[in-house]
Image (cartoon, grey):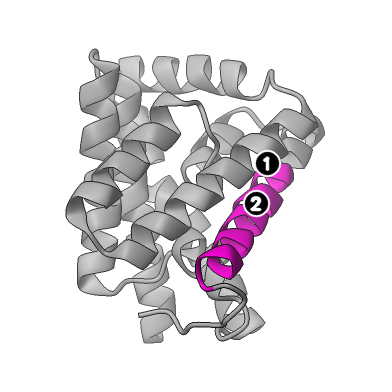
């Protein structure tokens, strides 16, 4: 298995751990803060996360982005479904959150995805622990949507409508990140770290 696939799966798994802790945490602020461990680890270890790289679309091959996205989606299911299969309360909470999440409109999911994309790009671009933690907390507490973190909710509550809404999140994350990169760099293209 090549390095990109391995690192993409591991990134997804880290996000999955974040999804579990955020989903079951009784304190929403603590859950949001603890979720940031996933992105801090991904940045520190130089792992591959689609939402951290899509803003650099002009310098990252589309094939690599596709591999990252698929690896992330596979990886995020490993901890979420494994833990949910062993803890009934986790599965119940995931189902509850999924129902609420996919009750939003297609447009809302795209918009929430865009703003999450903005925050994800800033978190990765700045490489500052405090900024990363706050970006993660803001996206979670604001109800913004992150395609990798949302995938387990789709997996346990699949329908064609929910799949369409999930694809709106993928598009929103991508647009928000790409536009933010463009605005930060005043139109210059920078390579990802």
- In the image, 41 versus 55, the foreground residue is 55
- In the image, 32 versus 95, the foreground residue is 32
Q: Is residue 56 magenta?
A: no
Where residue 136 appears, as percent x and y from the top left, is 35, 41
Q: Which circle marks residue 170 in the picture?
A: 2
User: In what element is the residue under mark 2?
Assistant: helix
Q: Residue at x 44, y 36 (%)?
A: 139
Residue 177 falls in image quadrant: bottom right
Q: Find out whether the residues at labels 2 and 1 contact each other: C-beta distance under 8 Å.
A: yes
Quadrant showing the N terminus:
bottom left
Where residue 92 appears, as percent x and y from the top left, is 43, 15
Q: Main secondary structure of the magenta part?
A: helix
Where residue 7 appears, as percent x and y from the top left, is 35, 73
- Residue 66 visible in the picture: yes
First to last magenta residue range: 166-185
Q: Where does label 1 land, which residue?
A: 166
Q: Is residue 181 above or below residue 171?
A: below
């Amino acid at each position: 298995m090549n390095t990109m696939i391995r690192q993409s799966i591991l990134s997804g798994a880290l996000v999955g751990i974040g999804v579990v802790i955020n989903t079951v945490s009784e304190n929403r602020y603590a859950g949001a803060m603890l979720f940031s461990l996933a992105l801090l680890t991904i940045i520190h270890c130089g792992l591959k996360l689609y939402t951290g790289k899509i803003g650099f679309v002009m310098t990252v091959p589309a094939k690599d982005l596709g591999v990252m996205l698929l690896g992330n989606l596979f990886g995020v299911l490993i901890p979420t479904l494994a833990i949910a299969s062993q803890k009934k309360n986790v599965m119940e909470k995931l189902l509850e959150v999924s129902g609420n999440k996919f009750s939003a409109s297609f447009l809302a999911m795209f918009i929430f995805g865009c703003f999450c994309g903005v925050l994800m790009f800033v978190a990765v671009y700045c490489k500052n622990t405090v900024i990363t933690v706050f970006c993660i907390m803001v996206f979670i507490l604001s109800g913004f949507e992150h395609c990798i973190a949302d995938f387990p909710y789709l997996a346990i509550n699949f329908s064609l409508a929910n799949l369409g809404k999930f694809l709106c999140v993928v598009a929103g994350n991508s647009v928000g990140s790409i536009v933010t990169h463009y605005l930060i760099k005043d139109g210059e293209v920078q390579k990802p770290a």
